[in-house]
Image (tube, rainbow, N blue to C red):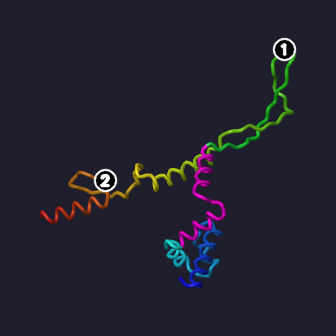
Amino acid sequence: MTELQELKKKKLCKAVIESGGNLTQAAKKLGITQQSVSKQIHKPAVQQTIIAILNKAGATDNKIATKLVKLMDAKKLQSCDVYVKEGEDGKYEINENSNDFIEVDDNQAQLKAIELLLKTKRHLDSDVPIPTPQVQVNVGEIKIMATEQLVDSLIRRLSKNG
């Protein structure tokens, strides 16, 4: 790779990272088409450069995984009004002069972390099946859901025997 190509690759990677992965914004910043960015971003050399830049910035795989696992238990502070005072009979009564914060589960952050972890595990864990697109095949009155590969295989077998 020439020095100019290396410079262009690094510039592309930097633009993609700075745009948060938004290829349209990266393309505008670079003055090229989104299709060009999309084509380049799938090249192994570009992906390796992006990973190297992120690792150098501290976004290592281990750090990301650790953070996602922590986010599964994310909490947030929620304001609440506590109106309590001790009454004449020794029981507590509501008092309008008290304000407090309580810690509660941050369900949105927890769900997002779980979603990202599941997506990652599906790509990395061979024990977790990756869903494949299915098509509906009508055989007379019977409707069968099957993968495109199975349908293609059945068609080839039927055409050989037919």
| Tag 1 and tag 2, C-beta contact below 8 Å | no
- In the rendered structure, the answer to whether residue 23 lies left or right of residue 141 reads right
Determine the main secondary structure of the stretch shown in magenta: helix
Q: Residues within 10 Å of mark 1 (few under 14, many from 20)?
A: few
Q: Pick whichever, 63 or 101, lies toward us.
A: 63
Tell me the element at label 1: loop
Tell me the quadrant of the picture where the C terminus can be found: bottom left
Q: Is residue 63 magenta?
A: yes
The residue at the point 62 percent across, 68 percent down is: 53
Q: Residue at x 26, y 60 (%)?
A: 151
Name which residue type carries label 1. Answer: Asp
| For residue 111, side relative to residue 161 (left or right) | right
Q: Is residue 104 rendered magenta in the image?
A: no
Residue furthest left as drawn: 162
Residue designated by label 2: 145
Instruction: Please give the residue where the numbered disc 1 appears in the rendered image.
Output: 89
Sequence-wise, the earlier of marks 1 and 2 is 1
The residue under the point 73% across, 41% down is 78
Residues 35 and 138: in front is 35
Q: Could you say where residue 135 lies in the image, as x and y percent from the top left?
A: 32, 58
Rendering coords of residue 85 (x, y %)? 85, 24
Q: Which span is picked out in magenta?
A: 46-72
Quadrant assignment, res 46: bottom right
Return the mark for residue 136.
none
- Vertically, is 137 above or below 72? below
Relative depth, front residue between 93 and 100: 100
**Residue at 74% across / 37% down in the picture?**
102
- Residue sticking out furthest to the top: 89
